[in-house]
Image (spheres, helix red, strand yellow):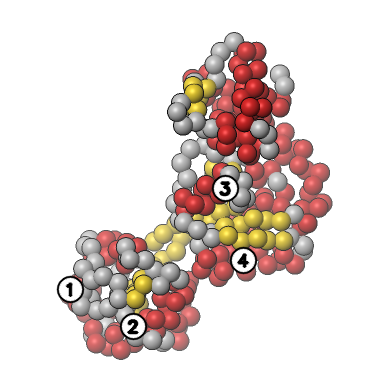
Amino acid sequence: MDLTLLRTFVTVHRAGSFTRAAALLGLSQPAVTGQIRTLERRLGHPLFLRKARGVVPTTLGDELAHKVAPHVDALQEITEAGLDEQWPQRTLHLAGPPEFTALRALPALAPLVVQGLTVRVAQGMAEELFEGLADGHHELAITTSRPRGRLLTATPLCDEEHVLIGAPRYAARLGGAAVVRDKGVAVLEHLPVVEVHESLPFVSRYWSAVFDAKPVAAGTVVVPDLRAVLSCVAAGAGIGVLPRYLCAEALDTGEVAALLSPPVPPLRTYFLVVRTGSLALPHLARAHEWLLRAAVSW
């Protein structure tokens, strides 16, 4: 059996599209279609059903992918192993949330940069990052949601705790975390809110998890950067919800105060997402492993 045909088959199976598979393989769409037809003729059975948008595997297609995909990935890893000595000279195309990437991921990758790895960073929402990975624009993405389908593989990286914060004068006005805990969300409803989007994603998630309620007030200050949210909250512009890693220093110095300490704080999980099989690339595998190792202490 031609290994090139099997590699193309596995890529189409994961991508769910001849066009997307062609982009990942560096081939034309007709070339991919021709290779799949050749494989289907040799097997004597269809492997995919053509739909208006992409393809779906037949039962035989799923069975074949389950059998051959691990071996195709292993052969690719062997093929790429010769690059291991040169891995630092490769460029890592990383994408993720700007604050987490800046404060967590890039410092963790600094030792690899010193060894010669070059890094290019992009940012975006989760669905944009998934599309960028699928289209080959990114190699590694950090997201707060899991991708669907077989094309991308997600590995849990770390959990972040969310903290309800305000300037010290807000904490004093409310009477402390014990008062907020006893009186509930009602004592917060009149306070201005600082957020990263009009939909109040951080505040809404916190309100739902801790108070089983939705926020009443609209955002008083909306700025698309969590670091700017911290600055505004510290200056007394309103209350906000931030990841603890981002506001820990401000909490320690008293620049801001935690308005509540719930028994079970809201958490959000980060994932490392790659194209399935791409960890055979040494520079990508090294960066992936390095981030997982660093995240143990986050």
Residue 204 spot, x, y in % from top left: 30, 63
User: Alpha carbon of mark 1 to alpha carbon of mark 3: how far?
Assistant: 43 Å
Query: Which residue matches tag 2?
Result: 237
Q: Answer yes or no: do the residues labelled 2 and 3 have beta carbons within 8 Å?
A: no
Q: Secondary structure at mark 1?
A: helix
Q: Amino acid at mark 3?
A: Leu
Q: Secondary structure at mark 2?
A: loop
| Mark 1 crowd level (few <14, some 14–19, many ≥20, 10 Å Cα) | few
Image side of residue 95 versus residue 112, left or right: left
User: Alpha carbon of mark 3 to alpha carbon of mark 4: how far?
Assistant: 19 Å
Say which mark, if any, is on residue 133: 3
Residue in the picture at 72% in, 61% down: 118
Query: Which residue matches tag 1?
Result: 186
Q: Amino acid at mark 2?
A: Ala
Quarter where residue 193 is shown = bottom left
User: Alpha carbon of mark 1 to alpha carbon of mark 2: how far?
Assistant: 19 Å
Q: Secondary structure at mark 4?
A: helix
